[in-house]
Amino acid sequence: MASIKKGDLVVVITGGKAERGGDKGKTGHVLSVDGNRVVVEGVNLVTKHKKVGQNDRGAKTGGIETAEASIHISNVALVDPETKKATRIGVRLETVTKNGVTKTNRVRVAKKSGKDI
């Protein structure tokens, strides 16, 4: 089971501090997960130069845009829903019986508070 999934609230735990232009301590929701890299909303912003063109109505497109770049998954940690601080993730097994069929589900649990994620 993946520890960090799309939509999770995470905090950046490594890198330069925010007052010096870095991203350490910033929080944001995960926009996408690609293997061992994640894209976090508002974190690791880069400047991209797009070729200027026109759409069918004549409006200009392109120019200089800012977008989020991916960062390694080891540089972010999930935010504990109770304490709002970085936490590790554990797994708790939960059995569910539906229509006479017993199924075992894995539930992600915050290590610090024990709350379900």
Image (cartoon, rainbow, N blue to C red):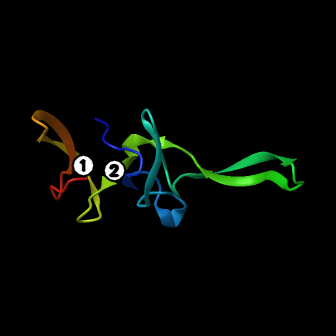
Determine the residue positioned at 40% across, 41% down: 73
The residue carrying pointer 2 sits among few (fewer than 14), some (14 to 19) or many (20 or more) residues within 10 Å by Cα, namely: many
Of residue 71 and residue 108, the one placed in the foreground of this image is: 108
Residue type at mark 2: give it: Ala
Q: Which quarter of the picture shows residue 102?
A: top left
Which residue is denoted by mark 1 in the rendering? 88
Q: Position of residue 42 (x, y in %)?
A: 53, 58
Can you name the residue that lies furthest to the front here?
Answer: 99
Q: Position of residue 49 (x, y in %)?
A: 75, 47
Q: Would residue 46 be found to the left or right of residue 19 on screen?
A: right
Determine the residue positioned at 70% across, 48% down: 48
Q: Position of residue 27 (x, y in %)?
A: 42, 60
The residue carrying pointer 1 sits among few (fewer than 14), some (14 to 19) or many (20 or more) residues within 10 Å by Cα, namely: few
> Is residue 67 shown above or below 101?
below
Q: Would residue 77 be found to the left or right of residue 114 on screen?
A: right
Q: Are marks 1 and 2 in contact (CB under 8 Å)?
A: yes
Q: Would residue 37 be found to the left or right of residue 54 on screen?
A: left
Label 1: element kind:
loop
